[in-house]
């Protein structure tokens, strides 16, 4: 979807303005987290076990991604 937008700055209302490269970096970071979490889930790790593999400040995003993956499996 980002490819269809001609904007160079993005304003979420929750952070500083981001440019296209920053948005792409964030998207790639989220995709990597999804892959890692899915890999742990494939090995039958629980959410609590998976959380231990990441920093505490990522706890909320880890749970969100875990629940989204679990919902479609």
Image (tube, rainbow, N blue to C red):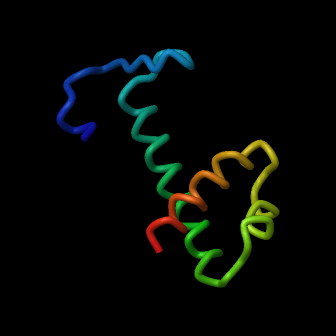
Residue for point 47% across, 16% down: 17
Judged left or right of residue 54, residue 26 is: left
Judged left or right of residue 37, residue 20 is: left
Whether 59 is drawn above or below 1: the answer is below
Residue for point 82% across, 63% down: 52
Where is residue 33 drawn, in percent x and y?
57, 57
Judged left or right of residue 61, residue 29 is: left
Q: Nearer the viewer, residue 14 or 27?
A: 14
Residue for point 24% across, 41% down: 1
Residue for point 71% across, 77% down: 45
Which residue sits furthest front? 71
Judged left or right of residue 26, residue 55 is: right
Q: Quadrant of residue 51?
A: bottom right
Where is residue 16 drawn, in percent x and y?
54, 16
Where is residue 12 drawn, in percent x and y?
46, 20
Where is residue 54 drawn, in percent x and y?
75, 57
């Amino acid at each position: 979807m980002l490819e269809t937008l001609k904007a160079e700055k993005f304003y979420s209302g929750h952070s500083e303005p981001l440019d296209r490269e920053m948005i792409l970096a964030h998207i790639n970071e989220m995709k990597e987290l999804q892959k890692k979490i899915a890999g742990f889930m494939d090995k039958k790790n629980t959410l609590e076990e998976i959380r231990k593999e990441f920093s505490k400040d990522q706890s909320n995003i880890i749970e969100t991604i875990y629940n989204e993956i679990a919902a479609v499996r």
